Amino acid sequence: MSRLDVVIFGATGFTGKYAVIETIRLKKKYPELTWGVAGRWFNQTNSSEDISGITVIVADVKDESSLKTMCSQAKVLVNCCGPYRWYGEAVVRAAIESKSHYVDVSGEPQFMETMQLHYNEQAREAGVYVIGACGFDSIPNDLGLVYLQNNFKGTLNSVESYLSVRVSPEYEAEARKTGGLHYGTWESLVYGLAHSDELKPLRKKLYPERLPTFKPKLEKRSIIHKRDGKWCLPFPGADESIVYRTQRTLYENNQQRPAQFKPYVRFSSLLQTLATMFVCIVMFLMSKTGFTRKLLLDYPRLFSLGLASHEGPSEPVMENTTFKFDLYGEGWEEGADVDATPPNKKMAVKVSGKNPGYGATVTALMLSAITILKEQNKMPSTGGVVTTGVAFKDTDLVKNLNENNVTFEIIDSQ
């Protein structure tokens, strides 16, 4: 039996639903694409789009044989079933054993690094790619930095990234009612904080040898600081972890100097900055015990100050939310002595789009799957558990994202 190009697992979930809608849109550009949906149950009423005639596969994360049956029907398995800490490993294992490539939108560093530690060699032996974080976490920063490196024309030493998110003023009131995050995203954040102490010993196993020290060192900025007139905080997402894995792998594979990286997020006011910092501190402390963690999970709107909800943001709010990452790079121009002279070149890149959590995310996710199908000759020949920056560095993914409303552009070069 011939395999489908793509199977979307978790198609009845919040993100999975939008992955289905995006696949229908992309099908117009890629008419040869064959695809199906999978989940514990599915019927036409679960989708706002007409998917009559599409292959439907019944699969359950608790049923290993059903996962293998599902994966054996896919060239690329798109996993939208999270939190990945609880539900991801069985799907990764089934994909590798079935020799199906795998992509997801995980923003959970512990899960991704555990998969690399335990399954990288198995994936290589099977000749498949296992690629996490193919959405808002963390394609804008990971491929944005690679894009900056590819265009720098010199030696890039460090990058600072600043995320800005904006809801159109006429939809701000509705955003306060519906929130901006779906419960599934909130749940992943809570469990990520709860088990954050796992990451350091995990990384020691994954990378027993330290990287050489590269100078000048990119120092952390103060927790609250201003840049370009905006108040800023450290960005608590998975991006720093993923960019580190990309840069380390590129260094180990071809001795390309790894760029140091620090991510931040911008706010329009000091009050908003302080409120966000307060929420982050409360989340971190409450995530550490079972009782208080349950409160976080039971009352997401209360403890996120309205940002997260079980229902998720409304369609108008999502479609009228925009984002941009400004990546500020610093290094040396071509021919400069990097050991004897201070950095003498700067470049800035902007990655922007709309509907970051459930629009740009599913666009990047599905184009990642399509890139595997069409451009394996431009990807690492070994396969394995890799990041987006490693997997797609030499492909046309950035070009294709630019053509689908996720824009990468150089905004300044000195």
Image (cartoon, helix red, strand yellow):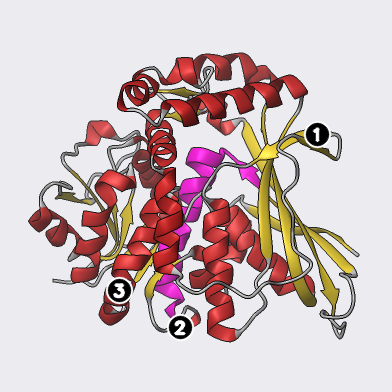
* Amino acid at pointer 1: Lys
Q: Residues within 10 Å of mark 3 (few under 14, many from 20)?
A: many
Q: Residue 230 carries which label?
A: 1
Visible in this render: residue 33? no
**Which residue is more in the foreground, 289 or 85?**
289
For the point 41% across and 67% down, the residue is: 206
Q: In this view, does 118 lie above or below 174?
A: below
Residue found at x 58% / y 85%:
254
Identify the residue under disc 3: 123
First along the sequence among labels 1 and 2: 1
Label 1 to label 2, Cα distance in Å? Answer: 43 Å
Q: Earlier in the sequence, mark 1 or mark 3?
A: 3
Instruction: Confirm whether the magenta stretch covers residue 182.
Output: no
Amino acid of disc 2: Asn
Which of the labelled discs sits on residue 327, or is there none?
A: none
Q: Which of marks 2 and 3 is nearer the N terminus?
A: 3
Q: Label 2 belongs to which residue?
A: 377
Q: Can residue 15 be seen in this view?
A: yes
Magenta stretch bounds: 352-376
Vertical relation: 383 (above or below) 186: below
Is residue 364 rendered magenta in the image? yes
Quick check: 1 left or right of 206?
left
Q: What element carries label 3?
A: helix
Crowding near the residue tagged with mark 1, few <14, some 14–19, many ≥20 C-alpha atoms within 10 Å? some
Task: Give x and y (percent) for residue 233.
Answer: 69, 37
Mark 3 belongs to which amino acid?
Answer: Ala
- Whether residue 163 is situated above or below residue 78 in the rendered picture: above
The quarter holding residue 46 reads top left
